[in-house]
Image (tube, coloured by chain):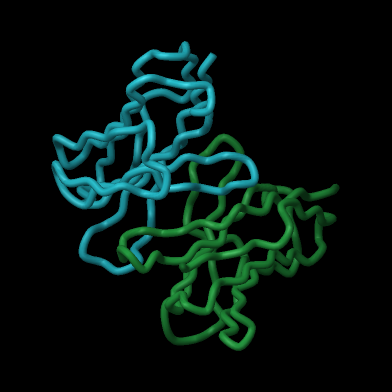
Amino acid sequence: DVKVTQSSRYLVKRTGEKVFLECVQDMDHENMFWYRQDPGLGLRLIYFSYDVKMKEKGDIPEGYSVSREKKERFSLILESASTNQTSMYLCASSLGGTVFGELFFGEGSRLTVL
Amino acid sequence: AQSVTQLGSHVSVSEGALVLLRCNYSSSVPPYLFWYVQYPNQGLQLLLKYTTGATLVKGINGFEAEFKKSETSFHLTKPSAHMSDAAEYFCAVPGYSSASKIIFGSGTRLSIRP
């Protein structure tokens, strides 16, 4: 069974803390994505990566960075968490080389910043 | 810029009634369209997609959608709602800047009344 696993389902952090959200996929997918989901706004793309060590900014990259040192792992980093980053974060992966391929999602990480 | 609009953030229907969730896309979008579903406390999963060919697309769990170019619409329907259909539904289109990027609508939450 194919899987995208996000390391933490729920996190509570303090303002100013550095936060790491980890995502691992076991499908050997080239593409990986981080989305943020907020009520009424749908999913907004933060960053995506189409290969190891490659990354591109999405629509809302400010305040975030990413790391992809291995093909199966894509990390989202909040350098200094702020209350407006309280949200649900979704990781996804897809096969590279295919146009408009299916996205496979993890179950999400709900982050609360106090 | 490409975009997708979902009409109605919340739809409520009775069990056994017709489900109709509306999605309109900007005309600049290439004719590739998706519906994803998110069940409570889960990530998103692909419900169906239109790429080429037949304009009526069948998906999982009895859902289908019809691509209507003249109306720039891709509405999702199901003839008879089931309690298990309660979820959030997202229409999505590919982004022009990168074929790997998918742009999501704001979502429609479907509630089913007993």
Q: Nearer the viewer, residue B107 or A16?
A: A16
Q: Quadrant of residue B71?
A: bottom right
- Asked whether, in this view, residue B72 is left or right of residue B31, the answer is right
Q: Residue at x 80, y 53 (%)?
A: B12
Image position, residue B39 (x, y; %): 59, 44
For residue B24, above or below residue B12: below
- Asked whether, in this view, residue B39 is left or right of residue B54, the answer is right
Q: Nearer the viewer, residue B104 or B3?
A: B3
For residue A22, above or below residue A45: above
Image position, residue B77 (x, y; %): 68, 69
- Asked whether, in this view, residue B84 is left or right of residue B100, the answer is right
The reply to whether residue B56 is visible in this rendering is: yes
Q: Nearer the viewer, residue B54 or A57?
A: A57
Q: Quadrant of residue A70?
A: top left
Q: Residue at x 33, y 44 (%)?
A: A47
The reply to whether residue A2 is visible in this rendering is: no
Image position, residue A74 (x, y; %): 26, 36
Image position, residue A89 (x, y; %): 45, 35
Q: Colour of chain A?
A: cyan
Q: Where's the N terminus of chain A, which quadrant?
A: top left
Q: Colour of chain B?
A: green
Q: Residue at x 46, y 58 (%)?
A: B103
Q: What count of labels does the image hold?
A: 0
Q: Where's the C terminus of chain A, which quadrant?
A: top right
For residue B89, above or below residue A110: below
